[in-house]
Image: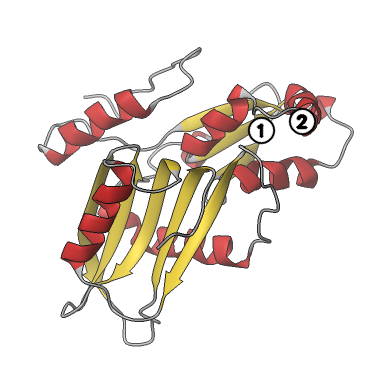
Amino acid sequence: RMDHILLETTGLADPAPLVSILWLDDQLESSIRLDSIITVIDAKNFRRQIDEHTNSSSFPEAFHQIAFADVVILNKIDLVKDNLEDLERQIHDVNALVTVVRSVRCQVDLNTIFDRQAYGVKNSSQLQELLEYSKSAPPNSRHDNSISTLCIYEQDPVCLTKVESWLEDLLWEKKSNMDIYRCKGILNIHDSNQLHTLQAVREVYEVVPAREWSETQSRMNKIVFIGIILKNDS
């Protein structure tokens, strides 16, 4: 029995088709479940790509891959004399929810990248922590075609049917000026004591009950979109 299967997809800029297949297999009670997406970033070359992007209307492939990632391994940090915190800030500008792991020669503790359960309902506590971080992170100031993060917060309970219809308009019908790569969220559903989690990769999404809300917990809806030309048209 294998503990993990690591699929290495060098050259595959868009992991969404593969993610969709594995995710659907998980929903069909397959013995294999999708755990997370890991991206390795060359710290030295990433700095060069950022500098080139400053004077360009396009964005580097690295940004595209960061947008889909749950974990980024920031490699070759020994070759970078600049501020590593600045590089991490640039990564979080693209994807506010990603976990950054620093490394030299890709030597990392496997416990930091395996069994993340990024697509499981059991990670609701971690997801809430990430959403709180994205709320406190400074807003992205770019207004070009860069990949960035949009956070939406709503105090009142929401109707599950209306949320699903809204998501399908955004993800399936493209009825907004949003090209969405990833979406994560915590939902307070009307007439339900269950905290619901939202996950989406491109057109594939799911909203599932994770656990009961605690009495001390603020029942706020929190949704994070990662994509291009994001506007709050809700």
At which x and y percent is residue 55? 80, 29
The residue at the far left in this view is 28
Answer yes or no: do the residues labelled 1 and 2 have beta carbons within 8 Å? yes
Vertical position of residue 187 compared to residue 229: above or below? below
Element on which disc 2 rests: helix
Name which residue lies at 16% across and 63% down: 161
The residue at the far top in this view is 11
Can the viewer see residue 147 in this picture?
Answer: yes
Residue bearing the label numbered 2: 77
The residue at the far right in this view is 81
Depth check: give the residue in front, 140 or 125.
Answer: 140
Q: Which mark is residue 234?
A: none
Depth check: give the residue in front, 96 or 110.
Answer: 96
At which x and y percent is residue 132? 52, 67
Can the viewer see residue 107 in this picture?
Answer: no
Q: How many marks?
A: 2
Residue flagged by tag 2: what amino acid is it? Answer: Ile
Vertical position of residue 207 compared to residue 60: above or below? below
Residue flagged by tag 1: what amino acid is it? Answer: Leu
The residue at the far bottom in this view is 215
At which x and y percent is residue 122? 29, 56
Q: How is the image coloured?
A: secondary structure
Query: Quadrant location of residue 165?
Result: bottom left
Depth check: give the residue in front, 140 or 179.
Answer: 179
* Quadrant (top left, top right, bottom left, bottom right) of the N terminus: top left
Name which residue lies at 49% across and 34% down: 110
Residue bearing the label numbered 1: 74
Name which residue lies at 61% across and 37% down: 145
